Image (cartoon, rainbow, N blue to C red):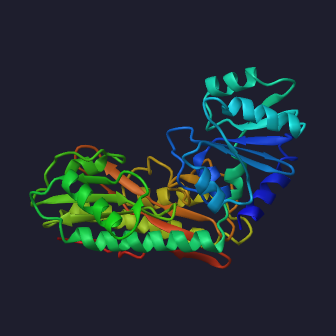
Amino acid sequence: MFEARIKLLQDSLVNHEVDGLLITSSYNIAYLTGIHAFSIEEREARMIVTKQNIYLFTDARYTQMVKDMATFVNLIEVSTDNPFSKTALEVLIDEKIKQLGFEEENITYKEAADFEEKLTDIDMIPVEEVVENIRIVKDNDEIEKIRQACTLSDRGYDFILKHLKPGVTEIEIKILLENFIRSEGGSTSFESIIAFGKNSAIPHHLSTTTKLRSEDCILLDFGAKIEGYCSDMTRTVYVGKPDEKFQKMYEATNGAQEVAMDYLKTHMKKGFEIQKTQELANSHLATNGFPKIPHAIGHGVGLQVHELPYVSPFADEDLVPGMVITNEPGVYVPNLYGVRIEDTVLITGDGLEILTKSPKELVII
């Protein structure tokens, strides 16, 4: 499986006019090796892929793990006495690399400049989303892990509904939900968004000590992760009796998602344009007296909770079977409340499969 992914990457180097590729994204390293242990924040591993070989550079903390899990790579152990810049240069010279691509969206300017200073007769060429464009279509193993993550998210939703009672705080609900996901063998895809009342009108609200009132709306945006693969879902519920405006807003948002789903199902038909998904959802909202969605209606999901393909007014990708995306329209009224409904969706050969199964009828607690 990993060898096949590497072969696809090696074959793509010609199209990017480079002899090799320096990979610094820990997500891309995980995709190519199956090792998810490398830190996202720290540079604990790097890879160099050439047209014939693949090299993984890491330190002694991880050498045994690499030997056990990725026998198909050339492992090079780095240290203070044998740094990456030195060992990488030896590889590049041995491989006769003249043009080395690097992931422009993942490496800092200083890091790239410092490394380039040490190179002799080798040009560093910025490239964009080379591995990500291979990751965009998931294989059966990846889809199964995403499906399991979605199932865990659904279970998390069922669990947390029982704890939504007046007096609890956003942070308390956030901790309960995330601890449940961890206790069931998963981890979180991202920092959960738990928003009560007027905070729900802030699309990416940071949870606080705000208490749930007896008449309040609740926005729950969260995701689980299984073996490195993410899910993403949002539900909006209400404690007490919702007023007519909230009910209308909820129905309009739910309807906008249904309109978008119906259009996404036609992705295999001639004339399908991904950007039209948001146009149709916005048109439905406008008909019901609500503003446009202030964010993209969807995004890819996989090793990262936000990845290719993009589903927005500016997107131009084709949807093909094996892609996993979200569908998440939202309506927000500042200082009042907001509604967002989001599902993780698999693109199939004859339409789509909604992977997050939680009901979308308005839940009133």
Q: Tell which residue pokes out farthest to the top in this image.
A: 117
Q: Quadrant of the N terminus?
A: bottom right
The x, y position of residue 216, in whole percent, is 16, 58
Q: Quadrant of the C terminus?
A: bottom left
The x, y position of residue 105, in whole percent, is 63, 37
Q: Tell which residue pokes out farthest to the right in this image.
A: 96
Give 365 or 109, whichever is nearer the viewer.
Answer: 109
Give 5 or 157, whichever is nearer the viewer.
Answer: 5
Residue at 21% in and 52% down: 170
- Residue 202 as seen in the image, left or right of residue 167: right
- Asked whether the viewer can see residue 309, the reply is no
Give 36 or 169, whichever is nearer the viewer.
Answer: 36
Residue 185 falls in image quadrant: bottom left
Residue at 81% in and 34% down: 90
- Asked whether the viewer can see residue 178, the reply is yes
The x, y position of residue 146, in whole percent, is 52, 69
The x, y position of residue 244, in whole percent, is 21, 63
Labels in figure, total: 0
Q: Is residue 79 positioned above or below 222 on the image?
A: above
Q: Tell which residue pokes out farthest to the front in this image.
A: 81
Residue at 55% in and 62% down: 325
